[in-house]
Amino acid sequence: MKTLLAAGALALVLAAPQAAGQTALQTGAPPLDPALEVQLERWLGAGDQIFANLYTRQPGDDSVDFHAAADERGPTFTLVRVSDRSGNAWLVGGYNPQSWSSEDGWHITERDFRRTAFIFNYTDPAVYRQVPSTYELPSQGAYQTFNALDQGPTFGAGPDLLVNDRLDTALSWRVSYGDPAGEGQSIINGSVGGQFFAIDALELYAVSPIPEPAAAALLAGGLGMVLLARRRQRMPGVACAGGPAPGAA
């Protein structure tokens, strides 16, 4: 029988010093590029998507700033570029099918059809999906995300991927995501023991399907008819349907 870590244990991470003594500055190119977009769409498996930037970490930001941009914005991808003291770097992140919140606590997904979140390592390509309820501990994969104002984006009960309140330190300890045989391993470098990593960049993107051409054409046609009708109503001497024009004999 596997053991889930209590939510209160996350306080230890929130109090941790910054992993590599760096300031909270964005470094390097933005994490999202066309190649990453294609890979994220493949992992999501829902066709072409629109990625809209909701948040990019700025100097001095903390979890309050993150939630101000992220809460109640629907499905999102979180992208986190991290590094260790030796200068090794990774791009990791997660897909949250629900909106982030400042006060919900755990988003629990008891049914498998709701366990659609995943976390990933793009540098050493791997994707980790929520543990299904058919596992020996059915609730293990139910802990989708943890939502609190004093915490950055957090996936799983390990926490499987956590960003602290200062948005400068990340931790990964798999419990709710991926093969349970790898419980306790980091999705970042495969280590065990809860290694801390400095966050060099953090971005959040809202994601939504690109409308099908037929649907887009119908929408455009409908809007055109509405605009035409309103224009005709404003033109003097134009008859409305069912009656003569004003002043007509």
Image: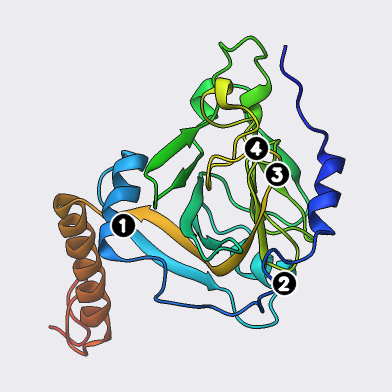
Q: Please name the residue that numbered disc 1 is placed on.
A: 37
Name the residue located 56 percent from the left edge and 32 percent from the top edge: 177
Residue in view at x 72 percent, y 59 percent: 164
Asked if 128 appears above or below 224 in the picture, the reply is: above
Q: Is residue 116 left or right of residue 124?
A: right
Disc 3 and disc 2: Cα gap in Å? 22 Å
In the image, what residue type sits under mark 4? Answer: Val
Of residue 242 and residue 199, the one placed in the foreground of this image is 199
Gap in angstroms between the C-alphas marked 2 and 4: 27 Å
Instruction: Check whether the beta carbons of the residues at disc 2 and disc 4 lie within 8 A of each other.
Output: no
Dot 2 falls on a residue whose secondary structure is: loop
Q: CA distance from mark 3 to mark 4?
A: 6 Å
Mark 2 or mark 4, earlier in chain: 2
Q: Earlier in the sequence, mark 3 or mark 2?
A: 2
Give the colour scheme of this rendering.
rainbow
Going by the numbered disc 2, the residue's amino acid type is: Asp
Residue hosting label 2: 62
Q: Which residue is mark 3?
A: 194
Task: Determine the residue positioned at 17% across, 87% down.
Answer: 237
Counting from the top left corner in percent of width and height, residue 216 is at 20, 58
Choose the circle earlier in sequence order: 4 or 1.
1
x%, y% of residue 30?
41, 73
Tell me whether circle 3 and circle 4 mark residues in contact (CB < 8 Å).
yes
Q: Mark 4: few, some, or many residues within 10 Å (few <14, many ≥20)? A: some
Residue highlighted by disc 4: 192
Kindly identify which numbered label has been placed on residue 227: none
Q: Secondary structure at mark 1?
A: helix
- Asked if residue 115 shows in the view, the reply is yes
